[in-house]
Image (spheres, rainbow, N blue to C red):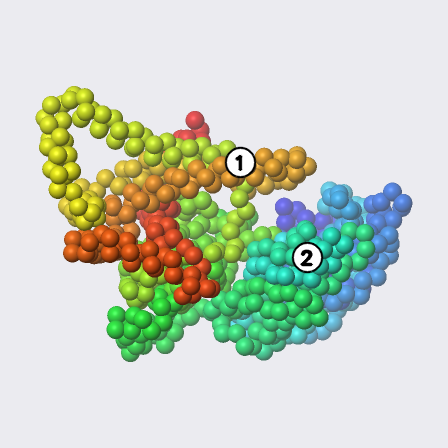
Amino acid sequence: MFLKLYNIFSKEERLGIGQPISHTDDSERNQVLGSSNIDLPSANTGMYQLNILLKSGINLAVRDRGGTSDPYVKFKIAGKEVYRSKIIQKNLNPVWNQEASLLIQNIAEPLYVKVYDYDFALQDDFMGSAYLDLTRLELNSPTEVTLNLKDPSCPVQILGCLLMTVTLVCRETDTRHTKMFLRRNWTPSCKVQNARLLEAHRGDQLWRGVVSVTLIEGRDLKPMDPNGLSDPYVKFKMGCQKYKSKAILKTLNPQWREQFDFLLAEEKDGIIDITVWDKDSLKKDDFIGSCQIDLSGLSKEHTHKLDIALSEGKGHIVLLVTLTASTPVNLLDLSFCMLDNKEERSEIAEKYSLLRSFQNLRDIGIIQLKIIKAEGLMVADVTGSSDPFCVIELNNDRLQTHTVHRSLNPEWNKVFTFNIKDIHSVLEVSVYDEDRDRTADFLGKVAIPLLTIQNGEQKAYVLKNKNLTGATKGVIYLEMDVIFNVIRAGIRTITPKEQKYIEDEQKISKELLQKNYYRVRRCIMVLVNTGRYINSCFDWESPQRSLTAFLIYLVAVWNFELWVIPLMLLILVIYNYCLIRSGKDNRFSSMQELEESLIAYEEDEDDKTDKETERKGLMDKLTALQEVGVAVQNGLDEVASLYERVKNIFNWTVPFLSWMVVFVFSACTIILYFVPLRYILLVWGIHKFTKKLRNPLLIDNNELLDFLSRVHSDVQVVHFHELNQESSQGLMIFKKKNNSG
């Protein structure tokens, strides 16, 4: 397709300085692409900056009924949009006078210029295109260019022309930093991205990192509407980079839960300006308040939770801010890996030793993560490759690597360090493909519970899909080290879990209802089978079994004491532990059965997004029904998860928690054996009745439920299960068979 379009234009047309002529042959085309009037270095050995002054258009094509057009210009390199001009309303001879500066990695790639007519709520109309051969430009010399616009489907017709001044400049720069110039998570609707790149290029600077801002909530905002409420939304600005959150209707305590990324330059654009507005449909939006974030006072590679009061107004906003560097860390240099340094590792181990267990109960431990490389990733670009980068999340901490362009086997060699707030947290590593003109594509994900990490071992993890229910293409190599204090971790286990601020929006799903129904049915069938077994003892279907059960019942009732209860539970936990140690572990078969059922019910949420948008009016009418459905759906999930967590305590799914249970049951057995029950109940009652008096600000909680919330349900066990190459291929074959059936 590229060669066909290139044949349409002559040498002069590609530079925009001549009149159209007939098609060129292959030899002439190759000569144009390969020749130049100056000596240029290889396109792969350096970087170039193309400065463009888009002046005006002359006699552009008519695309509107009124005999005019609303033209704007797109610039593309290698098939990707790099700049978009402003829209000039109702003018066939528009004057832009806009400047753009573009980084060029390969000047052999021509600049593709396309002109469109803007149509509100409709698809924009094509007004013509042209190519600019960059190899024909003289370095450091401004060139006046006239681009004759044509339609590839009708090359004879002239659709007007564009007047520009272009200057090609050779830049000497570190190629590691140029990769961060390509913006992550671009969306077509976010037109301000072009202004950001323009400002960055004009300032002759490269990005040194990413600032990730998570807008969580607002508190006690100023009422601006007659009903005593507001419809607040937030605007962010850092330099020329701007973002706008969604508006939350009729509230003074909005919950946004949105995340935005800013490109960060060294020692510049260190202030993020934040303004809060009340949305009004019939008049100008009302100003609620403002505040600022000074990035110079925040440490890098760390997530900061900020509660900022609004000036010139009332209320607070709560944000998470993370500064991530853009350059990789050389793993051969141990100064970057503090746990690889023996002296620093011993100091950290001493900090979290048992002798210092009660010094800082909130500081559980530390984890060091090395993201080394990935292999065999999914192809996401039309060029047959991908531009992968990783996002690492631990609760509300979120960091990301640099991008490795055009590679299915990227090497990041990046080291991250997180403070552990809960040893039962799950480390999530997601791989995305970077796209400048649309949202990043998902390539794979792994979820790793911190308690399953083996220190210092480099492992290859098979990537999973978004739902973590099946394998996708590729593996990622990670090396992790975890150091934590066992006593602090145990105390943290019986306190409320940290709330995760950014989560996927819950929607009613028939498949999810079916999946949760299947889980509840499995739980109920266990109880039904147990009841049938007991009834069979009463009915003497097996005389030997019934006689044994009768004698055990008589002995247990005659000699019953309260300490027998934790003792029997302790025996059950120890029995399952012995089965596992002896190799008679039956957990894998049940987990594999559940994994296959999850794959059978899996749905593609991305394909449903467009359909739900089209049915937006209908969904508004069914809002009440959806809320009920979501409540029922979550209720089934809670019931199933509660049973599964209780079951998994005794079968050593999470050994750390099972050892805690062994300790608690042993202590309860000894205490109940030596201490009368009345004294224990007296101490417990005094504690429960006076707890609020001793600490009025204490948040009441249920220690048992907090403990159970750390135990993995069967679905979580499937999510966190590590796949090997054979099992991943088997699951993918099963999924294909299920889809074909």
Q: Residue at x 36, y 39 (%)?
A: 595
Residue 654 position in % (x across, y down) = 29, 51
Q: Amino acid at mark 1?
A: Gly
Q: Nearer the viewer, residue 676 or 589?
A: 676
**CA gap, disc 1 to disc 2?**
28 Å
Q: Nearer the viewer, residue 350 or 108?
A: 350
Query: Of all residues shown, which one is farthest toward the right?
Result: 66
Is residue 106 found left or right of 231 in the rendered image?
left
Q: Amino acid at mark 2?
A: Pro
Is residue 730 found left or right of 150 in the rendered image?
left
Numbered circle sitting on residue 232: 2
Residue 333 in view here: no
Residue 5 position in % (x across, y down) = 68, 48
Q: Nearer the viewer, residue 598 or 432?
A: 598
Q: Residues within 10 Å of mark 2 (few under 14, many from 20)?
A: many
Residue 605 position in % (x across, y down) = 53, 41
Numbered circle sitting on residue 426: none
Q: Which type of secondary structure does the marked residue at label 1 adopt?
A: helix
Q: Residue at x 38, y 42 (%)?
A: 641
Residue 608 position in % (x across, y down) = 57, 38
Q: Which type of secondary structure does the marked residue at label 2 adopt?
A: strand
Q: Nearer the viewer, residue 291 or 386?
A: 291
Q: Residues within 10 Å of mark 1 (few under 14, many from 20)?
A: some
Q: Which residue, given by chain and number where applicable, does mark 1 sit on?
A: 629
Which of the image's four quarters has the C terminus? top left
Quadrant in the rendering for residue 169: bottom right
Q: Residue at x 43, y 35 (%)?
A: 515
Give whichever of discs 1 and 2 has the lower sequence position: 2
Residue 122 in view here: yes
Q: Residue at x 51, y 56 (%)?
A: 501
Tell me whether circle 1 and circle 2 mark residues in contact (CB < 8 Å). Answer: no
